Structure formats: C-alpha cells, structure tokens
Amino acid sequence: MFNRRYSRKVEIWQKTEVSDGYGGSVLTSTKIKDVWAEIETKGAGYKFTQYGLNDFKNPVIFSIRGKQNGITWNEDTSIKYKGKEYIVKGIQNIDLEGYFLEILTEGQ
C-alpha cells in the first residue's frame, strides 16, 4: 500500500557521548541507520504554527514509517540527505500508534 510512497533513502544521526581517551567524554554524531522517506519541502515563509513551532528558516517534512525503525527521537537527532543536515524540531504522529511519522525539520 505504501511501498512506493517512501522512495528516498535518508540517514538518521544522533549525538552521543564518546570517551575522549583522557577520562572525559565528547559529544559526537553517530549514524543510527538508513530509512526510506518521503520528502516535502515548504517555502521559506511557511511556519509550523499548527504544531506550536514558529522559528524556521528552511522547513522540510520527512514522512517515514516509525514503529519498526526503533529510533528514539529527541532534540539530538538529525537527518542527512544528499550531504545536507536537517535538525529535528518536532514529530507529528500520523496514525496515533507510531507506525507513520512526520518529522518536522529545519535545513542548515
């Protein structure tokens, strides 16, 4: 039913603490996995006000299948697509069970 809807492969990255070798730790981005997504770009004037988010420069919406991916989404999560990084600003649960998610992001 949704096989051809998600036609672009994107990378999910998260910031994690890694030992720096001197007894401390450093935040570094690590790749979690590749997922298939549908990408929808919005104009520069578009704001996600219906979700309570106002300050966006380059809004992009990634639609993915969420439940089987096992990703914990938080403010340290980002999406990379074609060499550009998109910072996750919000998540919209489409079917209220977590199977389909819209990831609201801002491009760099």
Image (spheres, grey):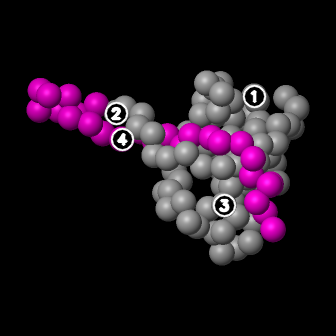
The residue that appears at 82% across and 37% down in the rendered structure is 41
The residue that appears at 45% across and 46% down in the rendered structure is 32
Distance between the alpha carbons at the discs numbered 4 and 3: 23 Å
Start-end of magenta stretch? 1-26
Residue placed under numbered mark 1 in the picture? 57
Question: Does label 4 or label 3 sit earlier along the sequence?
Answer: 4
Q: Position of residue 21 (x, y in %)?
A: 14, 28
Q: Nearer the viewer, mark 4 or mark 3?
A: 3
Disc 3 crowd, CA 10 A, few/some/many (<14, 14-19, 20+): some
* 48 over 96 or under it: above or below: above
| Residue at the bottom extreme of this rendering | 97
What amino acid type is highlighted by mark number 3?
Arg
Question: Does label 3 or label 2 sit earlier along the sequence?
Answer: 2
Residue placed under numbered mark 2 in the picture? 27
Distance between the alpha carbons at the discs numbered 2 and 1: 25 Å
Q: Position of residue 49 (x, y in %)?
A: 81, 48
Q: Nearer the viewer, mark 3 or mark 2?
A: 3
Disc 4 crowd, CA 10 A, few/some/many (<14, 14-19, 20+): some
Residue 14 is a magenta residue: yes
What amino acid type is highlighted by mark number 2?
Leu
The residue that appears at 64% across and 33% down in the rendered structure is 81
What amino acid type is highlighted by mark number 4?
Thr
Question: Does label 1 or label 4 sit earlier along the sequence?
Answer: 4
Secondary structure category for the residue under label 2: strand
Residue placed under numbered mark 3 in the picture? 65
Distance between the alpha carbons at the discs numbered 1 and 4: 26 Å
Q: Position of residue 34 (x, y in %)?
A: 55, 45
Q: Position of residue 8 (x, y in %)?
A: 71, 42
Q: Evaluate whether residue 103 shows in this view.
A: no
**Seen in the image, is 22 located left or right of residue 16?**
left
Residue placed under numbered mark 4 in the picture? 16
